[in-house]
Image (tube, coloured by chain):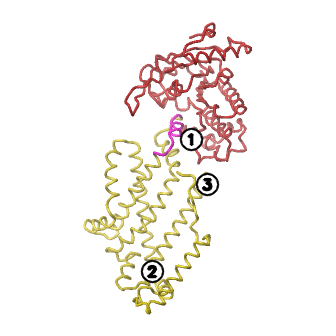
Chain colours: A yellow, B red
Amino acid sequence: MSLEVHREPLSFAGMRRETIITIVVLAVLWQTLSFLSPALGIPPFAFPSFARIGASLLTIAPLDVAVTLARVLAALAVSFVLGLGGAMVMYRSQSVEHHLRPLIRLLMAVPVISWILFAVLWFRGVEFRIGFVLVVVCAPVFLVDTLDAMRGVPRELRQMMRSFRPTSLQFFRKLMLPAIVPGMLTSWKINLSLAIRVVTIAELVGAVTGIGHQLAVAQELFSVADVFAWTLVLVVLLFLLEALLTRVEHRALRWRT
Amino acid sequence: MADVSGPPPIQVRALRKVFQQAATGSAIVAIDRLDLRIEPKEVIAIVGQTGCGKSTFFDLMIGLETPTEGSITIGGKTPYGDFDHFRGQIATVFQQDRLLAWRSALDNAKLPLELLGLSEGQQRERALGWLKRLGLERFAGAYPHELSGGMRQRVAIARAFAVQPTILLADEAFGHLDEVTAAELRSTFLDLACECGSTAILITHQLEEAIAVGNRIVVLGKSASLLADIRVADWTSAEYPVLREAIQATLQGNTADARLARTSRG
């Protein structure tokens, strides 16, 4: 774990001036393009004005956002438990590690789109398909990160702990688990943005609810304003979740400052 | 926890530890047939040059490693084979403080008590008591990074004493501290060890420390061969400079210096 992690709080109130300038410039550019598009021969739906995007935002149903969020969080929770459990077993047994390592590498090498196709071919339930894709993508990341974090616990500390003769359970609970908390929080951040991006693709195929499904609908209707609005919601959702995680991190890692 | 009968004697017989080097496969003899007996409540300093196998000896004493040949027995039991038997019996102060960064001083000091399964109240009371003895009561809630090196080592000492072990081990525990702090902590350590009636074994490479500490100084040469076994009581404090030089010469020549012969037991 690096001590010099550059941590910029992702809250909107605390935005830097440069960040605000960039956003404003992009917004002005977009608005100008939407204004000029008829004159430039660009189809009018390509760059909808902010008024139209705003109108689209107002039509967004909170249900779809909630459904997507629930899928992401549930799948992340399952992935985390599987990853942590797998890592603990692999940490304790070299033989298990040698058997599982190639499998994990294989899982991580398969493209997301292939998983989605497999899920459609193998399983029936929509929720199960989405859950499967998310877990199969995120769990190996949690596992590898956890195992790395465990391997990173200094030998000196492990020996100190063992010199007091703990049980295996105590060894994990009192030393290994607290020691890997910083690594785990980083892993959650990585997996969160991974899951948000994967869930939308998974929802594009076959789901009838969720942000991904709404994106598919918007695409069929050629409504760039809707696509833009949903994308905005996704990005804001991710930022909010990351901000939440950062707060958790500050609380959990008070001892580090 | 010390039973009424006091700590058991430690018997080291023909102890041998060989490591296989991972890269070359060649064998390295860290300890070659060491014989040593340590009586209950003895305070003993082990000196030797870096790489003489002192730390390996400690790992074997703690039970983190198993001997290649020979044995270490503590009251008839082996620290590696009867690992769980020695829970709450042996405590070690290491070279670095080895505190857990996410625990406050108090929580670090009570770590071994948590492992022993004492009640929360007992843990707190005992750990706090030892922190107080070491002058840290005002810092009980501080995290390690908020403490100086000397204070952190004090917490590590409190953590070891909180166990109330029958055998205390200190592996160059004061070596990296400034001299004033080291001397102070060393004497605190010895007073406490004496008060608790524990057998104390200190590893050091500093001869002043060895002479200041021990009833007994064991000088180890290459592969932990026993070069000299000195009873400090046989020397008057006026003779300490001679003793110091003799040990120095012993370490350099890897053979017992003649001046040590008159008092050597080994």
The kind of secondary structure element at disc 3 is: helix
Point out the stretch of residues depicted in magenta: A151-163
Amino acid type at circle 1 is Glu
For residue B264, side relative to residue A142 (left or right): right
Asked whether the beta carbons under mark 3 and mark 2 sit within 8 Å of each other, the answer is: no
The residue at the far top in this view is B262
Query: Where B209 falls versus A149 (above or below)?
Result: above
User: Residue B29: x percent and y percent?
Assistant: 44, 23
| B209 relative to B102, above or below | above
Q: Nearer the viewer, mark 3 or mark 2?
A: 2
Camera-side residue: B257 or B6?
B257
Q: Position of residue A72 (x, y in %)?
A: 43, 67
- Disc 3 residue type? Arg
- Sort mark 2 into few (<14), some (14-19) or many (20+) by Cα contacts within 10 Å: many
- The quadrant holding residue B196 is top right
Residue A228: mark: 2
Q: Whole-percent x and y of residue A136?
A: 35, 60
- In three-dimensional space, the C-alpha distance between marks 1 and 2, rounded to whole angstroms, equals 55 Å
Residue B56 image position (x, y, % from top left): 50, 27
Measured along the vertical axis of the image, is residue B90 above or below residue A28? Answer: above
Instruction: Look at the image and tell me in which quarter the C terminus of chain B lies.
Output: top right
Disc 3 from disc 2: Cα separation = 39 Å
Residue located beneath label 1 in the image: B114
Q: Determine the residue located farthest toward the right in the rendered image.
A: B238
C-beta proximity under 8 Å, tags 1 and 3: no
Q: Which mark is residue A254?
A: 3
Circle 1: element type: helix
Looking at the picture, tell me which residue is in the foreground, B253 or A136. Answer: B253
